[in-house]
Amino acid sequence: MTTPLIQLQDITKSFNQTLVLDKINMVVNEGESLAIIGGSGAGKSVALKIVLGLLKADSGKVLINGKISKPPFDKFLSEIGMLFQGGALFDSLPVWKNVAFKLLRDKKKYSMEEAKHIAVEKLARVGLNNRVAELYPAELSGGMQKRVGLARAIAANPAILFFDEPTTGLDPIRAANISSLIRELVEETSATAITVSHDMTCVKQIADKVNFLNKCKIAWSGTVEDFESVSDGVIYHFVNGLPSVIKGGLDI
Amino acid sequence: MDLVLSSLASIGRGTLNVFEEVGKLTLFVISTLGLFFRKPFYFREFARSVMSIGFFSLPVIGLTALFTGGALALQIYSGGSRFNSESAVPAIVSIGMVRELGPVLCGLMIAGRVGSAIAAEIGTMKVTDQLDALVTLSTNPKQYLVIPRVAAATLVLPFLTGVGDILGILGGYLVGTLKLNFSSQTYLSQAVQFLETADVVSGLVKGAVFGFIVAIIGCYCGFKSGMGARGVGKATTQSVALSSILIIASNFVLTEMFF
């Protein structure tokens, strides 16, 4: 049996005595595309930040390649790419420098020209032309910022990709475009992917496996197909976008 | 009885909050100082900070010092004339500007102009996940954002203080010669005659300390900024208030040391 790439064991996290995650367990194997889904405020992004070491769990363990890790996960972070919900682009840098940020840190490996060449290439891969490379993030639309964020995430050819609400705030057409682009990129690079989302259309396109968070716990775990075929309870309501009418239903 | 207890409780809470804040700030300063000697050093960020803190602050510092020097000359003349000491105006203006007003005014103006900008910039970066983005891009946010700004402010403030000193003395000179009937030569010779190297050095050292305070407090308030526009606004206000108080307090300590 192979060692999981990322494993969360009994992770608990609360903010100001409000419990957000209650002893959750999660396994991500190499090459898998996992989606963490759930209603707003279910703790999806908190779980993701704990995996990345951006937040410290109150209790529980994070294992990377079977080894217990404590933040900051420096070596792990050098192998990942991350797309943030709002893009999180650096306002003071032009688009191409945002994309090449990680490459420019490694001056021994990449010269300025090489880094710029790769950045322009990655921008082209996400459908943005040369002209955009010289603009500043504030000059771009929300959808373009997401694409630049995506280009930055894949710039250093990472082995693991994280996507935090990749389609939130986009119109349905742009959301579908971003989702299919993510799917293509994940397949192209054979990367392991973890996506946090509450958009079922996006999850169906991107993920193979689903972890459904509800009431601070992982309420369901399995394949996307099985998730969609659940015919009752909170999951059925979530998948079909129905108001929760069941007592003790979706915690939103 | 309840009123007494609740008053005591709120005093206790307030005291604990102050100690907690002092502790957090101390830890922030210590962790930042530790990073000063670690690679990489972000020269581009440093250069950008030198420009924004130093070069773009020159007009504000220059005008403040010029008018303060002029006002100081008038006040000293007015006070000095009560015991026939009008001739002391040039010496007191130059010593007062170089030892005290130059560095303090420079520090306070920079706290308002630069400290607030640093807190707002870093606070906004926190709110928009840019600090987290730096971490995921294998970059230590403190090393990337704090070290260049603190280094730039600490190095640049003595220069700004020097400029402020010169323009303050010039302000006094203009008022002295144009309004108070001092001859140009007398004013300049008296202004320089009583000025010692130690006066200049103490003023420049103060400038460096105030620069460090403004930048580190601006960064600290930015990093601990609450979420949303309100959180960033509060961080900005706090940075100006806290660094102004610390400048005034440390000025007393430094003056005592150089006394």
Image (tube, coloured by chain):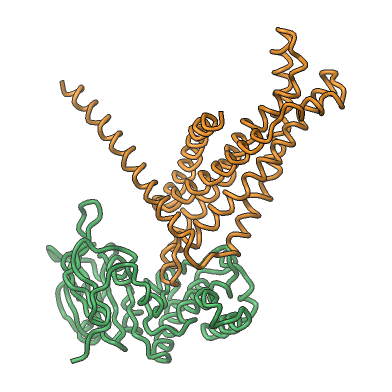
Chain colours: A green, B orange
Tell whether B138 sits left or right of B166: left
Tell whether B100 sits left or right of B121: right
Task: For residue A68, say whether it is visible.
Answer: yes
Q: Is residue A62 above or below residue B169?
A: below
Which residue is depicted at the point 63% across and 53% down?
B52
Q: Residue A119: where, in percent of width, then height? A: 56, 80
Could you say which is closer to the camera, residue A34 or residue A241?
A34
Q: Residue B233: where, in percent of width, then height? A: 47, 45
Task: For residue A211, say whether it is visible.
Answer: no
Q: Residue B142: where, in percent of width, then height? A: 45, 59
Could you say which is closer to the camera, residue B162 or residue A56?
B162
Which residue is depicted at the point 73% across and 22% down?
B73
Which residue is depicted at the point 44% across and 44% down?
B234
User: Where, quadrant-wise, is the N terminus of chain B in this rendering?
Assistant: top left
* Residue that protrudes farthest toward the left in the picture: A247
Could you say which is closer to the camera, residue B192 or residue B251?
B192
Q: Residue B172: where, in percent of width, then height? A: 76, 27
Tell whether A168 sits left or right of B48: left
Image quarter of residue A73: bottom left
Image label count: 0
Which residue is depicted at the point 49% across and 81% down?
A155
User: Where, quadrant-wise, is the C terminus of chain B in this rendering?
Assistant: top right
Q: Is residue A62 above or below residue B56?
A: below
Image quarter of residue A117: bottom right
Q: Is residue B88 above or below residue B21?
A: above
Tell whether A160 sits left or right of A249: right
